[in-house]
C-alpha cells in the first residue's frame, strides 16, 4: 500500500467531500457541526440510524441530508411559544427578573 494507512472516519458526521477522499476543511467541519446539532436537537438519536456506514456514505455523497427529527418540531414549537410569551410580557410592560435558586429558573414580577 505504498506506506499509506487506511484511516477510520466517523462516516455519519463526515461531509460529502471527506467521504470522497478529499481533505478536511473549515466547510467540512461546519457540516460535521451541523450533524452534531441535529443529534442534539433529536435528543441523541443516531444520524441515519437505519442505514449502515456504506449506505450513509453513498447517500451523503449523492446529496442526502438528515431528515428533520419529529422531536425537533416539538422543541421548536415550545421555543416559538416562549419567544411569543416574552414578547407579550414586554408589550404589556411587565417587569420580570429571572431568579435562579440552584434548582430551577423562575420569573418574578
Image (tube, rainbow, N blue to C red):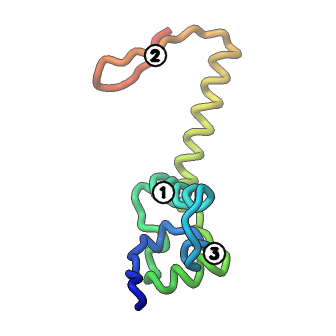
Q: Which residue is mark 2?
A: 98
N-term-proximal mark, 1 vs 2: 1
Q: Left of 55 or right of it: where is 94?
A: right
Viewer-nearest of discs 2 and 3: 3
N-term-proximal mark, 1 vs 3: 1
Residue located 66% across and 22% down the image: 88
Disc 3, SS: loop
Where does residue 24 sit, x and y in percent of width and height?
55, 64
Q: Which residue is mark 1?
A: 36
Marks 1 and 3 sit apart, C-alpha to C-alpha, by 16 Å
Q: Left of 108 or right of it: where is 63?
A: right
| Quarter of the figure with the N terminus | bottom left
Residue located 41% across and 82% down the image: 4
How packed is label 2: few (under 14 Cα within 10 Å), some, or many (20 or more)? few
| Residue placed most toward the observer, 46 or 109 | 46
Q: Which residue is mark 3?
A: 64
Amino acid at each position: 500500500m505504498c506506506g499509506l494507512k487506511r484511516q477510520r472516519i466517523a462516516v455519519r458526521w463526515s461531509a460529502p467531500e471527506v467521504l470522497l477522499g478529499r481533505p478536511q476543511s473549515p466547510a467540512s467541519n461546519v457540516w460535521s457541526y451541523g450533524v452534531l446539532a441535529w443529534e442534539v436537537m433529536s435528543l441523541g438519536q443516531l444520524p441515519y440510524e437505519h442505514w449502515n456506514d456504506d449506505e450513509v456514505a453513498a447517500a451523503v455523497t449523492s446529496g442526502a441530508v438528515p431528515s428533520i427529527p419529529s422531536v425537533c418540531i416539538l422543541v421548536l414549537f415550545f421555543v416559538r411559544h416562549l419567544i411569543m410569551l416574552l414578547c407579550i410580557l414586554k408589550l404589556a410592560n411587565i417587569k420580570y427578573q429571572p431568579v435562579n435558586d440552584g434548582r430551577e429558573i423562575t420569573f418574578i414580577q
